[in-house]
Image (spheres, rainbow, N blue to C red):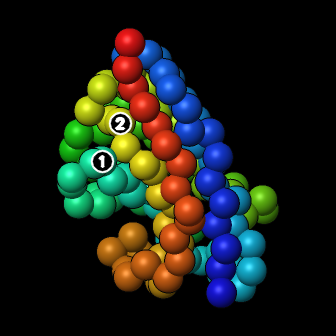
Amino acid sequence: QVQLVESGGALVQPGGSLRLSCAASGRIFDINAMGWYRQAPGKQRELVAGITNGGSTNYAYSVKGRFTISRDNAKNTVYLQMNSLKPEDTAVYYCAYFSGTSYYSGIDSWGQGTQVTVSS
């Protein structure tokens, strides 16, 4: 079992930046992909960004050029740097640990979620 703990969510003004962190513990295989999902009220959870062990990344079209995912395997931590935030980025953001090496694999574990609110 893998435990994921997110941090960094906050209230931020449009155009602002936030950095989310997700620390993983437990039975971790650092070859597995990790990623960030988000869920806004009344909407389905969606993949925001994924990253493989080798650093290959994938982003939702709506965040390309504004968000950057990275990972530090030595610290078992994945990050999401979010710039130029928009009100439509408001959601609960969840860290995900995939069951395989690809971010197209199934999800093995979820974090508890961290709230990001973009509002003036």
Label 1: which secondary element: loop
User: Is residue 95 found left or right of 7 in the rendered image?
Assistant: left
Amino acid carrying label 2: it is Thr
Which residue does the numbered mark 1 point to in the structure image?
40
Q: Is residue 100 above or below residue 63?
A: below
Q: Quadrant of residue 71?
A: bottom right
Residue 47: x percent and y percent? Answer: 32, 58
Q: Nearer the viewer, residue 119 or 81?
A: 119
Amino acid carrying label 1: it is Ala
Which residue does the numbered mark 2 point to in the structure image?
90
Q: Are marks 1 and 2 in contact (CB under 8 Å)?
A: yes
User: Label 2: few (<14), some or many (≥20) within 10 Å?
Assistant: many
Q: Nearer the viewer, residue 99 or 53?
A: 99
Query: What is the CA distance from the residue labelled 1 to the residue labelled 2?
Result: 7 Å
Of callouts 1 and 2, the N-terminal one:
1
Can the viewer see residue 120? yes
The residue sitting at 37% across, 52% down in the picture is 38
Q: Is residue 56 above or below residue 107?
A: above
Label 2: which secondary element: loop
The residue sitting at 56% across, 65% down in the picture is 111
User: Label 1: few (<14), some or many (≥20) within 10 Å?
Assistant: some
Residue 56: x percent and y percent? Answer: 44, 59
Can the viewer see residue 54? no
